[in-house]
Image (tube, helix red, strand yellow):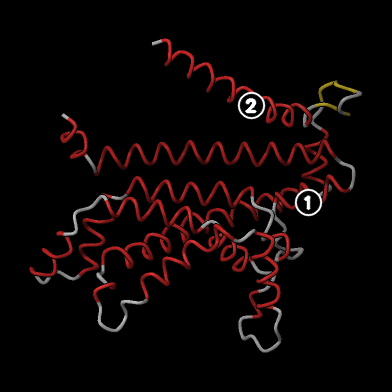
Amino acid sequence: RLRDTLLLLYVLGISAVLLLVLGMAVFGSFVKVWPYNLSFTLNHYTYGFEEAGVDNAWRNSVVMAAWCALAGAAVTFAGAYWLEKTGIEKSRWFGWVRPLAQLQAMMPMAVPGMVLGIGYIVFFNDPANPLGFLYGTMAILVISTIVHFYSSSHLTAVTALKALDNEFESVSASLKVPFYKTFWRVTVPVCLPSLIDISRYYFVNAMTTISAVVFLYSPNTTLAAISILHLDEAGNVGAAAAMATLIVGTSAAVTAVFFLVEWWLVVRTQAWRRTARR
């Protein structure tokens, strides 16, 4: 018990330090001039929304994060399923694809986001590239963000799929059940908690990312995190803190929604988990 108490105190101490740093940003968004005039004000929020165009940037971030959560989870889980459950490594002609795809999935983790952004600039700005029309659009922001955070999500999906018995696919094949029906009716429901976790991971990181998207946005697709940089460079530290608080609040609210949805879906679709524990 002493060990548990000491570890609890240690974790609480670390959490308090992190919350203190975050709390100072929140506090700075509600005072007139930090640290000289600490009187309460909402001017930083009204300035950001009425004059600095923060509302449009925040809306763009929410839209991009929602697309990343939906498309990112679908692409990541489908890719992991293809690598882990289709038996491609046993194929006579395509057995070499699996290790190459695994290497590609891990590569974004080793490449800085700014390098990825510069790579997108060079690639999509080539006049001979037929995909050049994507540059500066919301689509390229979504694609770059999914690629940027793909590695961790891929590992989560692979871990969930490895926990499933490989006989599911073998039995369904022997019964001549199409693989997509097994995928939709068995694999997805069993791995539903991991899928929701991947969606939440993409959403929160999309709301806060700067490194890659800072090279790819246009005036119509400015994001909330990028607006913080612009406000700070203009000397509006309070407005920048207000935007940061708005991002944190949005991420916290959406995370709470994800937790509620996950709890509801697990209760409705995975009663077997509670039965197995008993």
Judge by depth and name the residue closer to the eye, 155 or 75.
155
Q: Is residue 31 above or below residue 48?
A: above
Query: Which residue is pictured at 41% across the width and 61% down the height?
Result: 74
Residue visible at 33% across and 38% down in the picture? 264
State the image coordinates of residue 272 (x, y, percent, origin top left): 18, 40
Indicate the quadrant containing the C terminus: top left, top right, bottom left or bottom right: top left
Task: Compute the Cα span from label 1 to label 2.
Answer: 28 Å
Question: Of the numbered discs in the image, which one, if any, rests on residue 19?
Answer: 2
In what quadrant of the picture does the N terminus appear? Answer: top left
Q: Give the residue at x 32% y 80%.
A: 94
Frontmost residue, 110 versus 181: 110
Q: How many marks?
A: 2
Give residue 119's position: percent from left, percent from top. 66, 71
- Residue 194 at x, y percent in the picture: 37, 48
Residue 46 in picture, x, y percent from top left = 79, 38
The amino acid type of the residue labelled 1 equals Gly
Question: Nearer the viewer's eye, disc 1 or disc 2?
Answer: 2
In which quarter of the view is residue 267 placed? top left
| Label 1 vs 2, first from the N-terminus | 2
Please tell me the numbered disc located at residue 53: 1
Q: Element type at marker 1?
A: loop
